[in-house]
Image: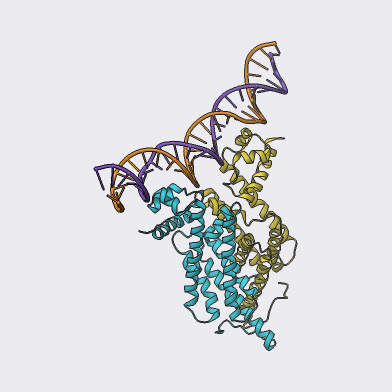
Chain colours: A yellow, B cyan, C purple, D orange
DNA sequence: GAGTCTAGAGAACGATCGTTCTCAGCGCAA
DNA sequence: TTGCGCTGAGAACGATCGTTCTCTAGACTC
């Protein structure tokens, strides 16, 4: 087992513990036990706890992007791709042990006193906004739609985490459909004059 | 100065410190200094730190409800009242030191290991959903609209906190207008037959 | 004025945590 | 075999934190 394998084992154990119990509730001793490594090796691979925390968050950022991509790439039209975001959320919320967005949690717990954490949380959120922005661009509507859709996704995560309502993803999806179709309608009106016909069944 | 005044001083200082730096970053000694009371008095009024935390959260719940009410009661129609929610958020996000929803932060930091905190965070969120539900009832549309509007508000809080985008409240408001009017349109279609006319300027 | 009660200041205690250090054991080259 | 380097186990260290205790001074009662 080389160093990289040890790193991955430590990160996997830390991710599970930190996500489940919070960052400050989990000590290095517990992480050592869960990862099955010695304290000595743990500190050789991650010189401080903050390094573990940041490695966990970077791993989570990559995993999140990959899973989102999978769902979005599984469907064809831009409209379906936008809605697939909420399908991803729905699947995620139903997983055992779901406890909200790891970046929101990290920001809430550490962001005020740890700028590395605050930075990566902000980057993650902004990158999600950009991701939606690119999808929205393809259907040719104003980018403010992307911001609105992002708010729905963020709200669903918070709501599902705190209240346990996994159906928040479905409510967000329904709202997203309305917003997308309204935006498409507006584009229609702008280019072709007044046109309030619904585009809900359009394949744009 | 009687005990109640001391309690309020302690809660006010704790609220400020906890909100700014997080709960576990603030020790009882710092709270004693900030509140200007002796450790002895502090512990007589609040037998444990958890009692301070819960008192702070209960105070925040009341304050939040009052401020929300003020904004909602300042306007007339149910539609305006629903939109006033986002006016409240906009004002809040622009305040110096805004760092997101205190209940989301508390849930993220302590919810996993402190069920009192998890409970009050859940109650706060559910109570906000009910509040919107009552406003939505008055315009006679399906209660799922209230859930959608709540998601926008939640998402705006998270987004404004982490990315610093105070305009998230305005995006949420714009989206809310679209959702409300679409819901009103659907009610119109249901009762009066097909009717896709926009109700954006209606005073319902 | 003596005795009693209360309060503040802050030392002290015990637990926890991040981090470092010690020590014994093992592989291995000469 | 001897010496060397590396490792794991876990003790140890120093800091912090929640909580309690001590000590002293003042207010109040009789």
**Can you name the residue that lies furthest to the bottom here?**
B192
- Image point 45% across, 58% down: which residue? B97
Q: Is residue A97 above or below residue B187?
A: above
Q: Is residue A152 shown left or right of residue B62?
A: right
Q: Is residue A37 above or below residue A127?
A: above
The location of residue A132, given as percent across then percent down, is 63, 63
The location of residue B36, given as percent across then percent down, is 37, 52
In the picture, the quarter occupied by the N terminus of chain B is bottom left
The one nearer the camera, A7 or C17, is C17
- Image point 54% across, 66% down: which residue? B168
The quadrant holding residue D21 is top left
In the picture, the quarter occupied by the C terminus of chain B is bottom right
Q: Is residue B93 above or below residue A121?
A: below
Residue A144 in sight in this render: no
- Image point 72% across, 75% down: which residue? A202
Q: Is residue B61 shown left or right of residue A169?
A: left
Residue B140 in sight in this render: yes
Q: Is residue A151 above or below residue A57?
A: below
The one nearer the camera, A134 or A200, is A200
The location of residue B186, given as percent across then percent down, is 66, 81
The one nearer the camera, B145 or A142, is B145
Q: Is residue A88 shown left or right of residue A101?
A: right
The quadrant holding residue B104 is bottom right
The one nearer the camera, B158 or A23, is A23
Number of marks drawn: 0
The location of residue A64, given as percent across then percent down, is 66, 54
The quadrant holding residue B116 is bottom right
């Amino acid at each position: 087992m080389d160093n990289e394998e040890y790193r991955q084992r430590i990160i996997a154990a830390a991710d599970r513990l930190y996500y489940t119990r919070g960052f400050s509730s989990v000590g290095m001793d517990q992480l050592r036990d869960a990862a099955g490594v010695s304290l000595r090796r743990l500190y050789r691979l991650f010189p401080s706890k903050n390094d573990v925390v940041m490695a966990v968050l970077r791993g989570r950022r990559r995993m999140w992007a990959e899973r989102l991509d999978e769902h979005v790439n599984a469907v064809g039209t831009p409209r379906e791709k936008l809605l697939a975001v909420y399908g991803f959320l729905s699947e995620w919320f139903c997983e055992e042990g779901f406890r909200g967005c790891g970046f929101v949690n990290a920001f809430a717990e550490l962001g005020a006193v740890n700028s590395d954490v605050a930075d990566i949380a902000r980057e993650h959120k902004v990158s999600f906004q950009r991701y939606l922005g690119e999808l929205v661009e393809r259907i040719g509507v104003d980018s403010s739609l992307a911001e609105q859709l992002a708010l729905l996704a963020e709200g669903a995560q918070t709501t599902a985490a705190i209240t346990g309502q996994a159906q928040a993803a479905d409510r967000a999806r329904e709202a997203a459909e309305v917003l997308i179709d309204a935006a498409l309608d507006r584009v229609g009106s702008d280019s072709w004059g007044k046109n309030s016909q619904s585009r809900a069944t359009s394949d744009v």
